Amino acid sequence: MNGDENPFDPTRWRATRSVRTEASVPEAELAGLPPDVRWLAGFGVLSVLLLLLGTLMPANWKSLHPALLERAGQGTATAAGLGLAAVSEQKPGAANLALSAAMAVKDPQVPKLTAELAKLEAARGWTTWGGRDAFIESVFKDATPARPASSAILPFLLTEKNRAVLREHLAPARSPGVQAILQTRELSSTMQFIPVSRPGGQPFEATILLTALLYQAERFSPLLAQDIRMAAEKANTSRLAGEWEVICMDLLALSRRLDWIQLSELLRVMPSTKALNDFVQLAKVAPENYFAQLYTAALLTRSPDKVTGYLLRFGKAGTADLTLALAHGEGAVQLLLDRSLPLGPARLTPGFLAGWTLTAPRGMLTAKVICFLLAGLGFFLVWRELSPVQTDGRAASGVRMIHGQRAAVALGMAMMLLAAGEPFLLKPLGSPEFRLRLKLPVLTNSPVPTDKTEKVTATKPRMDLSTILSIVLFAALQVGVYFMCLMKIREIEMSTGPAQLRLRLMENEENLFDSGLYVGIAGTATALVLQVLQVIEANLLAAYASNLFGIVCVALVKIRHVRACKRRLIMECQSESNSIRTPVAA
């Protein structure tokens, strides 16, 4: 090197950095070249920014970011807005339920709705129907007592006088559906109701008459009306009341807590008898004070089947998510039901990113993954320049292997950071809390199998998704530890010191070579603690898999690689000692 050359010239460093690891460039010429600080700082800052940008993106695989609910609910109808609409239509019964839901979600329009509802109820003397309805008032024009507030419809229909009025009104109906429903009063093979012809059959008759009245008034949705008519005709033909009793039981449960207007508004949007049964089931098992929110969400979205499906899937956690969505409005509830995902933790995110994620959810999720991958690549480049591999011309392929291992570690760490932002990645979606159904003992007319060779096949146990993902995570950690140990072995082997020194360095790294066991034990302990705390599903296979992978990793590293490397270094030490003693002997 000439005396007038500047070893810190960045131009000279950039011209030679591409051949730093080539066998044709001596290490002595590369030793004095420092890294370009500005270039490394730029890559480091860019990697951090990409990591931050990916973290701020509200796009997830198995959860929904709360910021998306807030964005989707802007400008849409709220629970209080639904109540105000009911007040304008003179339906205080539905408005009262909407008011209860609005108070539960702390809707800012609660004072306005309360004032409007009080004004409406003070101005008119409302009957037991929960609002003005010309049809029901014409049926009970001489039998309805005036009341200041609405009440449930079923107790009103249990009296003999009111049932007689309904029988007289419905008897001449020309609708085939009404007549099929009325004919079910003759069924005697009931299991959950007492037949109408026996003492105590008033609830069954009152429910049948109420169903016929709702059918005549066209208060059922078209599909629900079709299901009810088919069930009634089937029961009349077969004289078996099983399916028909389920429908009557569901309507009885609703009519015990809803007035005429509230029941009519709900049944107008109920798509099928299955959705009706799910709604009633959920109303029974959900928290006592949650019915108003369930009812309001069903009317607000006009999709009670989706509302009940979401809550039956996610249990009590789903009730909290639906409450938060209801606080933001109809658009937020619809988004939650359409995606059918639980809400993740609330994190700071810019509004424009939430808007882009709503417009193109898959595109934003792809962009998030790309940001983490590029951040990992940037960290690898910085790592490569800050910690260059010292080598001579004999192991250029080994240098490339070390760089490949470092790249895999950097990208693996980026993917682990990406997975850390997925709160439900290792947890199964869904909860059985609301799925238990009350089964009354009934006699069934199911045919007895006649095939003596028929065998009952036992279902094989299957691993759930959380167990599989846990095993994959523990395996990935051990793969990372394995490559770190290989990198250290390659680094020591390719160092330029004497063989005795490299052998001592190998012995000094024994703790690193045993790190697979430490990681495996830590993974097992962590999994067991999380299972005890019920953060993840209890599964011993997922817990002890971490320890098993650790044992395999350490055995592979120490038997296959460390032992072979030490053997080569011992042979080199012997060769060096022989070469030193030979001249002395001469």
Image (tube, helix red, strand yellow):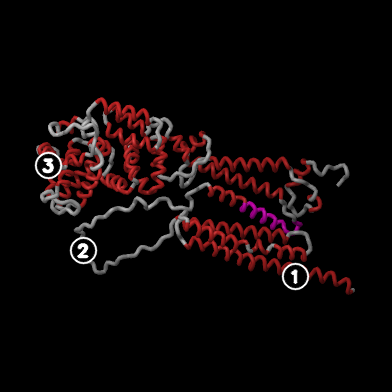
SS majority, magenta: helix
Measuring 67% from the left and 66% from the top, which residue is drawn there?
562
> Start and end of the magenta stretch?
391-409
Kindly identify which residue carries mark 3: 160
| Residue holding disc 2 | 448
Q: Element at badge 1?
A: helix
Instruction: Give SS at disc 2.
Output: loop
Residue 500 placed where, x, y %?
Answer: 77, 66
Vertical arrangement, residue 563 with respect to residue 89, above or below: below
Indicate the quadrant containing the C terminus: top left, top right, bottom left or bottom right. bottom right
N-term-proximal mark, 2 vs 1: 2
- Is 411 placed left or right of 584 in the picture? left
Neighbor class of circle 1 (other Cα within 10 Å; few <14, some 14-19, many 20+) is few
How far across and down, in percent of the image, does residue 46 sit? 64, 40
Could you say which is closer to the camera, residue 108 or residue 349?
108
Sequence order check, earlier mark of 3 and 1: 3
Residue occupying the far bottom of the picture: 585
User: What residue did someone put label 1 on?
Assistant: 571
Task: Measuring from the top left, give residue 291's x and y in whole percent.
Answer: 32, 42
Task: Reply above or below: 342 against 133.
Answer: below
Amino acid residing under circle 1: Met
Mark 3 against mark 1, which lies toward the viewer? 3
**Is residue 164 positioned above or below 531 on the image?**
above
The residues tagged by marks 2 and 1 sit, at their Cα atoms, a distance apart of 81 Å
- Which residue is found at the position 45% from the left and 36% from the top? 70
Q: Which of the two residues, 548 or 19, is positioned nearer the viewer here?
A: 548
